[in-house]
Image (cartoon, grey):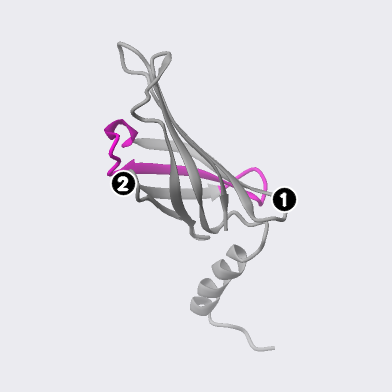
Amino acid sequence: MKLLPFALLATIAPIAIAQQPSSPYGHWSGQTQYQAMIGMASDPAAHVVIDMSLNIDPRGKVTGFSPENGCRLLGVASPGLAPHIVTLDVTLTGCAYARFNRVYKGQLSVLGKDAHGSFSLLAVDIAPPRGSTFTLSATLQR
């Protein structure tokens, strides 16, 4: 039995993980809802449903982009409570709605064997005079 060099194994293993149907790693895309609640009211200037592309590298790097509103995602993913879930810690930048530009926490979990993923991010701003919440949610596909 011939052993593979570590450098080659480190390159091949993440690709194999990302290709498993129940794996949250890999490329995802779909319509994503962006919302902002300022105090107790929804901000209509923030609410959009637009295309987003997301990539979760098996080694942990997360990148993404929504061309229509300019939002770029960059951050890290870590294993979740089950193999089909990853926990996300990402920063949005370049958003047309400037208040979306901040750090978010959330997750992506694979739904069944049909390669759909439930995606959600949340950021909370508790600064006075009123708190704000910012959310992204989607059902993404491979």
Disc 1 secondary structure class: loop
- 129 lies left or right of 77: left
Rendered image quadrant of residue 19: bottom right
Judge by depth and name the residue closer to the eye, 21 or 30: 30
Tag 1: Cα neighbours inside 10 Å, few (<14), some, or many (≥20)? few
Tag 2: Cα neighbours inside 10 Å, few (<14), some, or many (≥20)? some
- Whether 119 is drawn above or below 59: the answer is above
Whole-Å distance between the Cαs marked 1 and 2? 31 Å
- Disc 2 residue type? Gly
Does residue 123 appear in the picture of this structure? no
Q: Position of residue 36 (x, y in %)?
A: 40, 26
Q: Position of residue 54 (x, y in %)?
A: 46, 53
Decide: marks 1, 2 in contact (CB < 8 A)? no
- Disc 1 residue type? Gly
Does residue 118 appear in the picture of this structure? yes
Label 1 or label 2, whichever comes before in sequence order: 2
Q: Which residues are magenta?
A: 79-101
- 105 lies left or right of 3: left
Disc 2 secondary structure class: loop
Q: Quadrant of the N terminus?
A: bottom right
Q: Is residue 50 magenta?
A: no
Q: Which residue is mark 2?
A: 70
Q: Residue furthest top?
A: 129
Q: Which residue is mark 1?
A: 112
